[in-house]
Amino acid sequence: MSTPAVSTGGAGTPPAPPVQPRKGVLGSNPWLVALFLLPAVVLLGALVVYPIGYSLWRSLFDEEGSSFVGLGNYGDVFSNDATFTALKNTAIWVAVAPALVTGLGLIFAVLTERVRWQTAFKLIIFMPMAISMLAAGIIFRMVYEADPDQGVANAVVVGVHDTFAESTGYPKASAANWSDMTGPRAKGPYTTKGTVSAGEVAMLPLVGIPPNKVPGDPGPAKAATAPGEGVSGTVWLDFQLGGGGEKGAVDGGERALPGVKVEAVKDGEVVASATAAADGTFTLPKEADGAQLRLPASNFEAPYNGIDWLGPNLATWSIIGAYAWMWAGFAMVLIAAGLASVDRNLMEAARVDGANEWQVFRRITVPLLAPVLVVVLITLMINVMKIFDLIYIIAPEPVQDDANVLALELYTVAFGPRGDHGLGSAISIILLVLVLPVMIINIRRLRKEGRR
């Protein structure tokens, strides 16, 4: 039994024409499509596929490429101490640097909305991105210089330290002209050969420091006057530029050495002590009668010179700080762009409901910015995998092995004096394997956002 056709239109209405599939810009000619894709495919194969394939093949051979070693080079990566240290430091970089930079970028992005000159502030924070890694490495090599007179970091640290604990050491001073030295080439303690009596003035001249390089730039020394019962004296630098003056006497223009500690010693025990004043004078009580005067070794210790920023223990963390200085502006700009699209009504509603600023930031701002934060975090994770030039420039040669990472180890192994292209290729494949999970996560995220 046949079913009668159902008319979709009214009487006398012609049927609708069938929908034709829309042709693309290139039509349906596959050869034309292939022609346009060919340059991109050639470049992709020459710059990506071929290097990866060759590196994988080359990693299976020895350093000269003549003997097949299989996975031997990969075993060396995990058994060699230097390469294992590079792998460990790379893990530190991936775990710390992206999170640190993303956190700083988030803080800067939120704070710039509350400052009047936010454009100028953003420009200042973003400006390091215009500097090359080489230039940034040279800058921070100088910033982390150990000498506080040259390195900005230690100049700040020493300035803060000396504000609360003044350093009065004179490491280059010596007293060999009037004292016995304990131990060969020792820098104190120095002890007078004879004893002192009550009412006596003891002159304790020191030498060994150029007058124009005395720490703290003290004033002229003053000859002490005889006390009533105790023992007085002067500690000063017995030297004048250009010569002249009487040896062992305070001459005009000779510098005082304030802060020097003087001890009165009897039978090996300290019975009294005093500290030299700004003019170099000191006074000991009557207990010093019949004692020898001693300048303890603490007077000749080197002053506090700050932190060894580029030492074996801190080199990696110091370089991460330099990296954060460069890339915080990048994170700030991306996060600020995401923050501009956030619905401010949600924040205002939370404030009306009694939420404080920290609660608004933690429960509303950060969750709404989560997609942007993930983008920044993943981008920085891929970036730090190939970090190389900052470490190569900033880390001094003696500690470069302690701050080594896989990208730098790849360069030094493959193109350094060793020239082991087999092991270098193995390190490059390991770097690729480490980057792949991050890339896959990023691709899935992009596809998920594309379907929205």
Image (cartoon, rainbow, N blue to C red):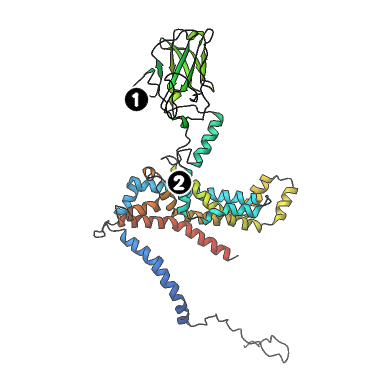
Q: How many marks?
A: 2
Q: Residue at x 47, y 34 (%)?
A: 305
Q: Position of residue 116 (x, y in %)?
A: 69, 51
Tell me the distance, in whole angstroms, between the alpha carbons under discs 1 and 2.
Answer: 34 Å
Comparing 292 with 79, the one in front is 292
Query: Is mark 1 in CB contact (under 8 Å) with mark 2?
Result: no
Q: Which residue is mark 1?
A: 185
Comparing 11 with 54, the one in front is 54
Q: Is residue 167 left or right of residue 358?
A: left
Q: Does 70 sit above or below residue 232? A: below
Point out the frontmost of discs 1 and 2.
1
Q: Secondary structure at mark 2?
A: helix
Residue 370 visible in the displayed image:
no
Residue type at mark 2 is: Arg
Q: Does 384 sit above or below residue 34? A: above
Judged from this view, the residue extending furthest toward the right is 352
Q: Position of residue 60 (x, y in %)?
A: 30, 58
Residue type at mark 1 is: Arg
Judged from this view, the residue extending furthest toward the left is 67
Q: Position of residue 202 (x, y in %)?
A: 46, 14
Q: Which quadrant, please, contains the N terminus?
A: bottom right
Q: Which residue is mark 2?
A: 141
Comparing 283 with 163, the one in front is 283
Query: Which tag, 1 or 2, sits closer to the chain's start?
Result: 2
